[in-house]
Image (spheres, rainbow, N blue to C red):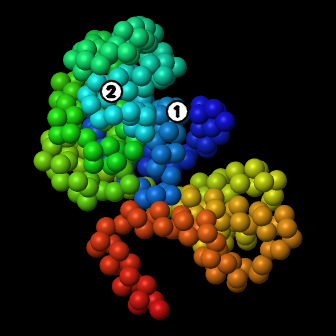
């Protein structure tokens, strides 16, 4: 399914609380971090924000006409030098032409011209200059670009201090035009020490949005997606219990819903009282739980262990 079409299926009030929180940052021209453990749906949420700009409209009001969120997928980096980094940002702006055209058609033409001019150039000065020219154009039109970096935690563990300082310097040079959202699996203080010595840390750490369990309405939508995909229909009791067992975490909920769909297709649905133990022994559930636990700090692991010991 094409990316744009995929996010069109999301309900307009998806992750409503988090959307409202981030909209307030954007309205104030601030940057921040969106933190979600593996399986919390962080990348899907960031994609939703970037491809469904109308969900921010109720909070940004008239300002929404001059704001564009552009996803910069850091999985696409072929190296960690400045030239590649700036060119990936320019390519992301080029690929966001539909959204940028809603703001200013001249901006789309400027981005395309400059991206085509430097896409095969390895001199970082040329790529940086092209990006600054794009930002100058946006500045002249009183537009705001929000670059959404994901996954940011893996990136900063290998990025050079020079690259991080350049990112901060770019934002400082265009404070009224540019801001950042960083998608993280781990909170910034628990990442590499290099970020702590970088001034970039200051602007990303001021605002944090923790992406936890979904609201029941979102969880029911996720279940509905799995029902539609498998041609199965669950009872209201089954849906409620799936949400309770998975805590409303997207990855766990999807895996549990597929498990139930498979059981229904085979005609082997066990009693509700057996679901917890059976799901816990499913390999897909174990893998998703492992993803979640990998994002915990040592202190959080110790707390979880103490809680588990106490419950036992």
Q: Name the residue under label 2.
A: 84
Query: As drawn, is 39 to the left or to the right of 20?
Result: right
Q: In which quarter of the image is residue 273?
A: bottom right
Image side of residue 124 versus residue 19, left or right: left
Residue 11 placement (x, y as % from top left): 61, 44
* Image quadrant where residue 174 sits: top left
Question: What is the total number of numbered labels drawn onto the structure image?
Answer: 2
Disc 1 to disc 2, how far (Cα)?
A: 24 Å
Q: Nearer the viewer, residue 21 or 38?
A: 38
Between disc 1 and disc 2, the foreground one is 2
Q: Report helix, strand or loop for mark 1.
A: helix
Instruction: Indicate the quadrant containing the N terminus: top left, top right, bottom left or bottom right.
Output: top right
Q: Residues within 10 Å of mark 1 (few under 14, many from 20)?
A: many
Give the labeled residue for mark 1.
51
Instruction: Answer whether labels 1 and 2 touch (C-beta < 8 Å).
Output: no
**Circle 2 crowding by C-alpha within 10 Å: few under 14, some 14–19, many from 20:** many
């Amino acid at each position: 399914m094409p990316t744009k079409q995929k996010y069109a299926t999301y309900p307009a009030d998806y992750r409503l609380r988090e959307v409202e929180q981030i909209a307030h940052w954007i309205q104030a021209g601030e940057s921040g971090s969106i933190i979600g453990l593996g399986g919390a749906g962080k990348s899907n949420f960031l994609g939703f924000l970037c491809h469904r700009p109308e969900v921010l409209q109720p909070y940004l009001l008239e300002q929404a006409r001059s704001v564009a969120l552009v996803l910069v997928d850091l999985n696409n980096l072929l190296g960690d030098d400045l030239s590649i980094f700036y060119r990936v940002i320019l390519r992301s702006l080029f690929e966001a032409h539909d959204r940028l055209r809603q703001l200013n058609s001249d901006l789309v033409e400027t981005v395309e011209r400059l991206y085509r001019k430097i896409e095969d150039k390895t001199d970082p000065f040329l790529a940086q200059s092209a990006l600054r020219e794009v930002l100058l154009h946006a500045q002249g039109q009183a537009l705001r670009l929000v670059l959404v970096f994901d996954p940011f935690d893996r990136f900063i563990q290998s990025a050079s201090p020079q690259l991080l300082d350049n990112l901060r310097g770019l934002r400082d040079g265009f404070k009224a035009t540019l801001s950042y959202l960083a998608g993280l699996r781990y909170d910034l203080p628990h990442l590499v020490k290099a970020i702590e010595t970088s001034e970039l840390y200051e602007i990303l750490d001021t605002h944090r949005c923790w992406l936890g369990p979904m609201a029941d309405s979102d969880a029911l939508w996720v279940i509905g997606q799995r029902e539609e995909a498998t041609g199965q229909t669950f009872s209201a009791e089954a849906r409620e219990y799936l949400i309770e067992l998975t805590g409303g975490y997207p990855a766990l909920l999807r895996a549990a819903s597929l498990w139930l769909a498979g059981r229904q297709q085979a005609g082997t649905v066990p009693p509700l009282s057996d679901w917890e133990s059976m799901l816990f022994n499913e390999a897909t559930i174990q893998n998703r739980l492992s993803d979640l636990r990998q994002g915990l700090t040592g202190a959080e692991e110790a707390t979880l262990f103490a809680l588990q010991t106490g419950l036992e």
